[in-house]
Image (cartoon, rainbow, N blue to C red):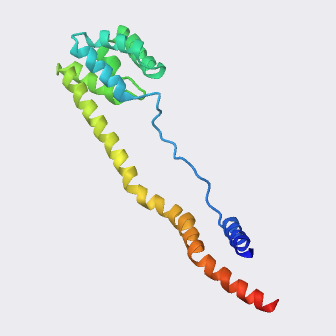
Amino acid sequence: MMLPALVAAVAVALAGTVSLPPFRVPLRRRRDAVDVGATARMLLIGLSAGLSLASVMEVAADELGPEPAAELRAVLRRSRVVGLATALATADGFSRRLFHRLARAHMTGAPTIGTIAAFIEEHRTVQRAEVLERLRRLPVTLTVPLALLILPGFVLLTLGPTVANIVQQLVGGLL
């Protein structure tokens, strides 16, 4: 009768002494609202349909979220003053790498479809590498919960009844 209460008391005492660090989810620098890959895919679809780069940027600005649309519209506004190639080359923001590549292709006369397709492939490769890096760190990250949460419970379950029997025999012999 006393055995389950003793095991529960030991479990509560052990759980109270183990102090875990606060769980923090690492914040990523890339915001979900700004997906450069989606912007590039939208531009690629429009260019594949035969539209000009400026027309594609206008259509994409209407279809994308607020932040990528604002970047596209800012480039389009600036392009009316200084030209599309210069506006793309001097663009800033989350899509800066894409815009700079488009500017280079526009200035040299290279096909923009190939430029965007290469950018999309590189962007996917970078994303895959980030995911693989996080997956490689996962076993190391999981050793902390294993060591602090699972192993003490396993030891308590395997040795707890034996220790409780010994304590009960010692205390029972004294009473």
At a point 48% along the width and 19% down the height, the residue shown is 66
Return the residue found at the far right.
175
Q: Check the image and report above or below for 46 versus 160.
A: above
Residue 77: x and y in percent read 41, 11
Question: Can you see residue 87?
Answer: yes
Q: Nearer the viewer, residue 159 or 140?
A: 159
Question: Can you see residue 89?
Answer: no
Residue 25: x and y in percent read 54, 47
Q: How many labels does the image show?
A: 0
Picture quadrant where residue 168 is located: bottom right
Q: Which of 6 and 137 is in front in this view?
A: 6
Q: Check the image and report above or below for 33 versus 80.
A: below
Q: Check the image and report above or below for 49 versus 22.
A: above
Quadrant of image for the N terminus = bottom right
Picture quadrant where residue 112 is located: top left
Q: In this view, does 47 lie to the left or right of 162?
A: left
Q: Check the image and report above or below for 137 versus 39.
A: below
At a point 30% along the width and 23% down the height, the residue shown is 41
Q: Nearer the viewer, residue 93 or 153?
A: 153
